Image (cartoon, grey):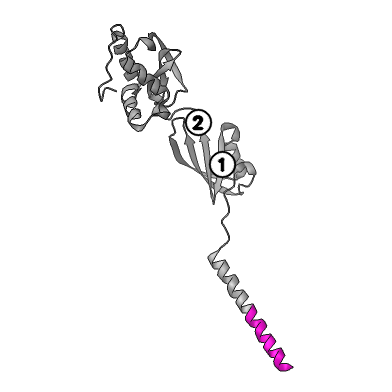
Amino acid sequence: MLLRFFYALIGLCMALGVAGAIYAGLCYFFPEPLRKPQLAATGHIRPGALYVQEEREYLCGDVQVSLAGRVDGRAALLKRYPASAGWELEERGGTVMARQRIEDFCPEHRNYRHLGIHDGYLAVFEGPLGHNEKLLRVERSLPVAQLHPDLQLKLYRAMDFGRQDAETRAVLKTELEFSSEQAASAFLDNLDEGAGSGAWRPPREGAQ
């Protein structure tokens, strides 16, 4: 009787040992998953001082990243970055990512101009090709139908820039995109002078 009890006790101890070894192995190879970042809108930004990194995304797709320093507490964070101004907040450890979508071009591309079409006339848009959100002016003296056929084709392609292949995009950028208002105006002046004869030449490399 005592011998059976002794063997049973040994079996129980061995079973507990095996179970403990399995648990330790699971904890080692499958640690507890990391917490997912919490959005400010959920109210789970942790209290206390937080470091903030700002990301501003512009119409042209450029993203400006900067460190904004430390903010003391969630209330101060939401006051500085209100959702009404388009800010989205996300916590990663002790750092908060503050993201804002700006409906404008970055400082560099704000000076850019490109040509396109509006109501059948040659038009000038702000920003680089592929962004026709900001129409600046329409050249009523330059109907597209009266321009050189090659220029007409390129203007239509410019209005559908996103669907062009890489080679076509490169050509359009060289000929219909300008880094300043002055460069665009100079091109239009030359184009207006030659409009009567139908003559048109693409701008020389470096003319912008």
Where does the N terminus fall, quadrant-wise?
A: bottom right
Q: Nearer the viewer, residue 188 or 157?
A: 157
Q: Quadrant of residue 26?
A: bottom right
Q: Is residue 5 part of the magenta span, yes or no?
A: yes
Residue at (60% x, 32% y) in the render: 84
> Residue 102 in the image: x percent, y percent?
50, 31
Q: Is residue 99 part of the magenta span, yes or no?
A: no
Q: Nearer the viewer, residue 193 or 59?
A: 193
Label 2 neighbour load within 10 Å: few <14, some 14-19, many 20+:
some
Magenta-drawn segment? 1-15
Q: Which residue is mark 1?
A: 89
> Residue 50 in the image: x percent, y percent?
55, 47
* Amino acid of disc 1: Leu
Compared to 1, does 92 lie above or below? above
Q: Nearer the viewer, residue 3 or 62?
A: 3
Closer to the N terminus: mark 2 or mark 1? 1
Q: Which residue is mark 2?
A: 102
Residue at (60% x, 39% y) in the render: 78
Point out the residue furthest to the top here: 196
Q: Quadrant of residue 124?
A: top left
> Residue 113 in the image: x percent, y percent?
38, 22
Question: Which element type, helix, strand or loop, lies under badge 1?
Answer: strand
Q: Is residue 93 left or right of residue 115?
A: right
* Amino acid of disc 2: Ile
> Residue 74 in the image: x percent, y percent?
61, 44
Q: Nearer the viewer, residue 181 or 14?
A: 14
Estimate the spatial distance between the alpha carbons at disc 2 and disc 1, rounded to whole Å: 15 Å
Q: Quadrant of residue 208?
A: top left
Residue at (34% x, 18% y) in the render: 184
Q: Main secondary structure of the magenta part?
A: helix
Q: From this viewpoint, is residue 143 visible?
A: no
